[in-house]
Image (cartoon, grey):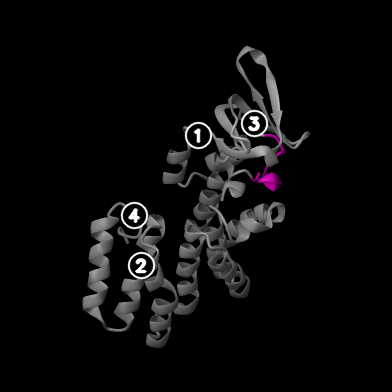
Amino acid sequence: MKKMAMIAVAALTAGVSLAQVQGLIIQQSGQQIAGKIQWRNSSKAYTVEQKGGVVVEIEPEKVRELRIPEPPALRKAIAESDIAVLTKLIKEYAHLNWDTVATRHLAESYLKRGDAKAAREICEKVVAANPEAAYLGEMAPAYWTALIKCDRSAKAEEYIAKAIQSGDRRSSAFALNRRGDLIFGSGDSPEAARKALRDGYLRVVTLYRDVKDAQPEALYKAARCFDTLKQTGRADTFRTRLQSEFASSEWAKK
């Protein structure tokens, strides 16, 4: 995951972060270097301008952790699904952690507008620069959703399987939700509902309770499966938990 945070969305940017932001680099050696940080594609390295104007260059392989403050415009852009601002943030924060976050939400914004093709294409530009982004990290769940909606379920399942096998709990939890989606389909088959619960949603609800951002979707979709199975009591139990524990989530508002 640390590696994912440092990977540039190279195909979406001019190769240099437009932002030069105050932050902190912790090197593999443990040494901490604070200052104005920027990524330079020409040298494939970070530059840190310290007090007094001293500039230090640090190769990404030497970086253990990169701490960059959240862009002020990010949360509003996410809340409003503002495609223009999210695209701008991807360029400004290339290699500075927040490019991958902005890419995830840009893809989700396209999905909300019903443009799965645009979401898939924006994700595939990232995957071309970094193949692991297809199954690990911030963007992967949105990419799987776009693939499924573009009738590329086989490719989605390939990446979902890799995510589950990766050992990364967040990636695994979201992958199980998407596996449930692939199985459940239109939601009118009791057999598919049982299998989606067993191989997808219930595993997230019971085994991945620590992955909080995957829980609301799993609870909502598990309830739908129990509706299909005519198990109203169990469906209500999951909806009650969704409303009590994740009332502010988009799934609780559905």
- The quarter of the displayed image where residue 39 is located: top right
The answer for how far apart the CA atoms under marks 2 and 3 are is: 41 Å
- Specify the farthest residue to the bottom: 191
Three-letter residue code for mark 1 = Pro
Residue tagged 1: 71
Range shown magenta: 7-16
Q: Disc 1, disc 2: CB below 8 Å?
A: no
Three-letter residue code for mark 3 = Leu
Q: Residues within 10 Å of mark 3 (few under 14, many from 20)?
A: some
Three-letter residue code for mark 2 = Val
Q: Which mark is residue 205?
A: 2
Q: Position of residue 33 (x, y in %)?
A: 60, 27
- Specify the farthest residue to the top: 52
Picture residue at 40% right of the left edge, 55% below the top: 213
Residue tagged 4: 249
The answer for how far apart the CA atoms under marks 1 and 4 are is: 22 Å
Q: Residues within 10 Å of mark 1 (few under 14, many from 20)?
A: some
Three-letter residue code for mark 4 = Ser
Magenta span dominant secondary structure: loop
Residue tagged 3: 18
